[in-house]
Image: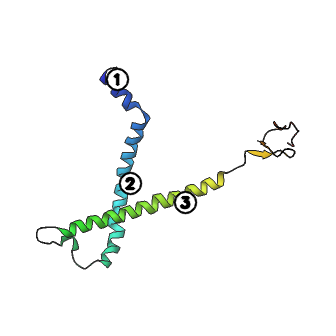
Amino acid sequence: MSLAQEFKAFVAKGNVVDLAVAVVLGGAFGKIVTALVGGLIMPLVSYVLPKGDWQAFMVGKFQVGTLLGAIIDFLLIALVVFLVFVKGLAAMTKKAEEAVVAPTTKPCPRCLESVPMAATRCRFCTSELEA
């Protein structure tokens, strides 16, 4: 198999396409989360932090304020993603799973073995079942 054919087979795999879509959507979602943190959450944080431009804080030639700002941004973005995706989606999927559960079998009244709901005769004791 030539290099071009191997590359074509690699790109045609579903995993590569799924990964590309995930990267594009992740980038777009990153902009939304950054806007949320920058526009809503960081102004609330600025009430707690010291007045003035704290991100311009320097120790000698080191820009400590910029590093602290990046760390706070990261922690807040991670918190928002955790609350929205991990907790929010888990709660939604849990409700969906609870609603979908439907029995697929029923017990035979004679031998108490599990038989399919649509069965008219028990496959274990051969007794007739109610419809």
The secondary structure type at the circle numbered 3 is helix
Position of 118 with respect to 52 (left or right) is right
Q: Earlier in the sequence, mark 2 or mark 3?
A: 2
Q: Secondary structure at mark 2?
A: helix
Q: Which residue is tagged 1?
A: 5
The residue positioned 82% from the left and 46% from the top of the image is 112
- Between 68 and 31, the residue placed more toward the observer is 68
Residue 66 vs 101, above or below: the answer is below
Q: Position of residue 14 (x, y in %)?
A: 44, 35
Q: Which amino acid is tagged 2? A: Phe
Where's the N terminus, which quadrant?
Answer: top left
Q: Position of residue 9 (x, y in %)?
A: 38, 27
Task: Say whether marks 3 and 1 touch (CB < 8 Å).
Answer: no
Q: Which mark is residue 91?
A: 3
Kindly indicate the quadrant of the structure image that contains residue 126: top right
Q: Residues within 10 Å of mark 1 (few under 14, many from 20)?
A: few
Residue placed at 56% from the left, 55% from the top? 93
Give the side of residue 71 with respect to residue 95, left or right: left
Q: Left or right of 110: which side holds 52?
A: left
Residue 4 rendering spot, x and y as whole percentages? 31, 24
| Residue at 70% over, 49% down | 102
Which residue is nearer to you in this view: 72 or 111? 111
- Say what secondary structure mark 1 lies in: helix
Distance from label 1 to label 2 (Cα)? 34 Å
- Label 3 vs label 1: CA separation? 45 Å
Label whose residue precedes the other's in the sequence (3 or 1): 1
- Residue 20 occupies which quadrant of the picture? top left
Q: CA distance from mark 2 to mark 3?
A: 20 Å
Q: In the image, what residue type sits under mark 3?
A: Ala
Return the mark for residue 29.
Answer: 2
